[in-house]
Image: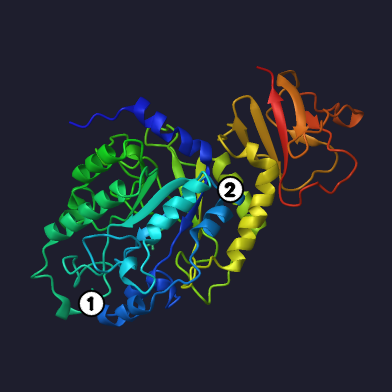
Amino acid sequence: MYQFNRAEYEKRMEWYTQARFGMFIHWGLYAIPARGEWVRSQERIPKEDYMRYFEEFNPVDYDPKKWARAAKNAGMKYMVLTAKHHDGFCLFDSKYTDFKSTNTKCGRDLVGEYVEAARAEGLKVGFYYSLLDWYHDDYPHYGDMNHPMRDNPAYGNENRNFDRYLEYLHNQVRELCTNYGKIDILWFDFSYGEGENAMRGETWRATELVDMVRTLQPGVIIDNRLEVSGEGFGSLWEGNPTPYHGDFASPEQIIPPDGLQDKNGNDLIWEACVTMNNNWGYCETDKFFKPSSMLIKKLVECVSKGGNLLLNVGPDAKGNIPPESLSILADIGGWMEKNSDSIYGCGKANLKKPDVGRITRKGNKLYWHIFENTVGCMPLMGLRREEVDCIRWLATGAEAPIAKSWIYDNYPDIVFADLGANPVLPDPVDTVLEITLKE
Ligand code: GLC
């Protein structure tokens, strides 16, 4: 019987909750049609038609050192690359398939180069691995919920051997956990369906899979999608962890309004995965990028609610991260350069959210994220004067004195920070005060 060891779990998660910010990378053959990573499924593209992209794939500009540098300079601490997405194309030299990057014109083990580049920048290494596989003949086709041929009775499942597919899946995960050194995150995606045909948990032979993974990579962190998808939270949330429980919940394209707690009200470790535009994989027409000012505030929001942000880039068919994404990453990096103390290792402050922004906390340090100024001095609601040791502008270390004026005499129970005469805050996006509480 599986015994969840909370002390071991919390030790394993330490670097991750310290890191708070990572890069998701969705890249593969689907960058050529450039209509997102679900293009084969959404457009019901038969395998033989999709193979033209395999014949063509030649990312001449691929340089993962550039990707890793962009992530590092943005203040990200880990990267998660799609080693295999739902289309089944492997960006690594797997001996179990020919449908892999080393058999394309580029002839390169794209994952191997990515791992080296990430490590060279001191970043933690993550692999996304799709449980679904629309290329493998033994994966259910007709009648499946997602397969490109799900509506076509000519693709019946009579001769498909799902156990053989599971062997393939487990063998490839073993390759990823064996051939690339220390792996820090395994991001499986995704479980689906209900009842006896549900593609979840032991349907994937999940206990055996996770036992193998944890034997090969003892410190690895695993997401919750052997159990759920972006929908649902998993058995850790249920308070009844399975042997293959996710180490973190993975809300997708949403920041949980009130953070995430398990059924018993205990804080859950979670990571919001978010696209910069509206697509994970490269989409030529999707120019709806979230402004960097918005994404800085979303990073702060995640941390203020006790979570991580995994922010996605979708490189194009040549291997370039889109310029819009690079610009956003550079802007976030500029803010992080001065304010990362208010992100790394921070979490919920357990104080009422201020009108003007958000609060993150690390030990006896509170970080007041000010998105807009007030009239007069800044009320620091929830703090008592006697508990405040000092207030500093985080970016410069300069003192922000506690206000002393008749104006505030009516509010003796509220601490007001004097932000000076200039009503325009130093940082137009998020000006951070560091408040040190008396120990
Ligand atoms: C969903 C999408 C998948 C994407 C994932 C990222 O599961 O189906 O394409 O990789 O979200 O969280």
Q: Quadrant of residue 26?
A: bottom left
Residue nearer the viewer, 336 or 262? 336
Q: Quadrant of the N terminus?
A: top left
Q: For ligand 1, which image quadrant applies?
A: bottom left
Q: Amino acid at mark 1?
A: Asp
Q: Quadrant of residue 437?
A: top right
* Residue 58 seen in this snapshot: yes
- x 36%, y 58%: residue: 83
Residue nearer the viewer, 77 or 100? 100
- x 49%, y 71%: residue: 316
Q: Which residue is mark 2?
A: 299
Mark identifier at residue 151 = 1
Residue nearer the viewer, 400 or 316? 316
Disc 1 versus disc 2: nearer the observer: 2
Query: In the rendering, at what x and y percent does residue 402 appear?
Result: 82, 27
Dot 1: few (<14), some (14–19), or many (≥20) neighbours within 10 Å? Answer: some
Does 353 sit above or below residue 56? above
